[in-house]
Image: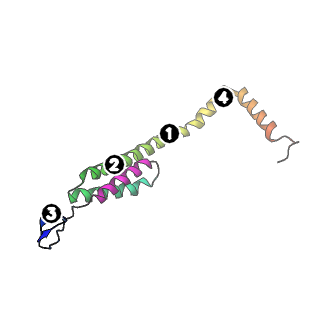
Amino acid sequence: MYDEMNGYESDNVSMVKEQEPGVGFGIASLVLGIISLLLFCTCINIPLAILAIVFGIIQLVRGSGKGMAIGGLITSGFSVLALIVFYLVMGLNMSKLSDMDSYLQQYERMYPELFDDLDDDFDEYYYDDDDTF
């Protein structure tokens, strides 16, 4: 039979195009990786990065659409690395803050008149008898 719409002969057999494997896991991996990278200083990025890695691996195993899966793996890896660096830097700075007390005590010994004036100003401002809170 001649099919007038398509211009070729057919036997009324529907032609089903085989569907290619989707890239949904690759897209999900990339999106979750980018979100986890943007939220690296929170603890939310850990589950997002884990999901991005899992979805990226699933997409790589499927075999198609590897670019977005690789992008998701890279961004989630950078997210975890940024989190580690962030907390290391914060931890090192916190140890320096404990040294700040000794620095302030040394500064107070060096400039006692400045601290006396500040204490007097503080007392006058907060403990004035005329003002009531």
Query: Which residue in the rendered view is the most extreme toward the bottom?
Result: 12
Task: Give the residue type that dot 1 points to.
Answer: Asn
Say left or right for 122 vs 75: right
Which element carries disc 3, helix, strand or loop?
A: loop
Identify the disc placed on residue 77: 2
The residue sitting at 32% across, 51% down in the picture is: 72
Residue at horizontal 31 percent and vertical 47 percent from the top: 74
* Among numbered discs 2 and 3, the one appearing first in the sequence: 3
Q: Do the residues labelled 4 and 3 touch (CB within 8 Å)?
A: no
Q: Mark 1 points at which residue?
A: 93
Q: Position of residue 130 (x, y in %)?
A: 88, 42
Answer above or below: position of 85 versus 120.
Answer: below
**How far is disc 4 from disc 3 in space, using C-alphas?**
98 Å
Q: What element carries label 1?
A: helix
**Which is more toward the observer, 42 or 13?**
13
Q: Which of marks 4 and 2 is nearer the N terminus?
A: 2
**Which region shows up in magenta?**
22-40
Q: Nearer the viewer, residue 62 or 74?
A: 62
Mark 3 is on which residue type? Gly
Q: Distance between the residues labelled 1 and 3?
A: 75 Å
Which residue is painted at 45% across and 45% down in the image? Answer: 87
- In the image, is 36 to the left or to the right of 21? right
For label 4, the crowd category at 10 Å Cα-Cα, with few meaning under 14, some 14 to 19 and many 20 or more, is: few
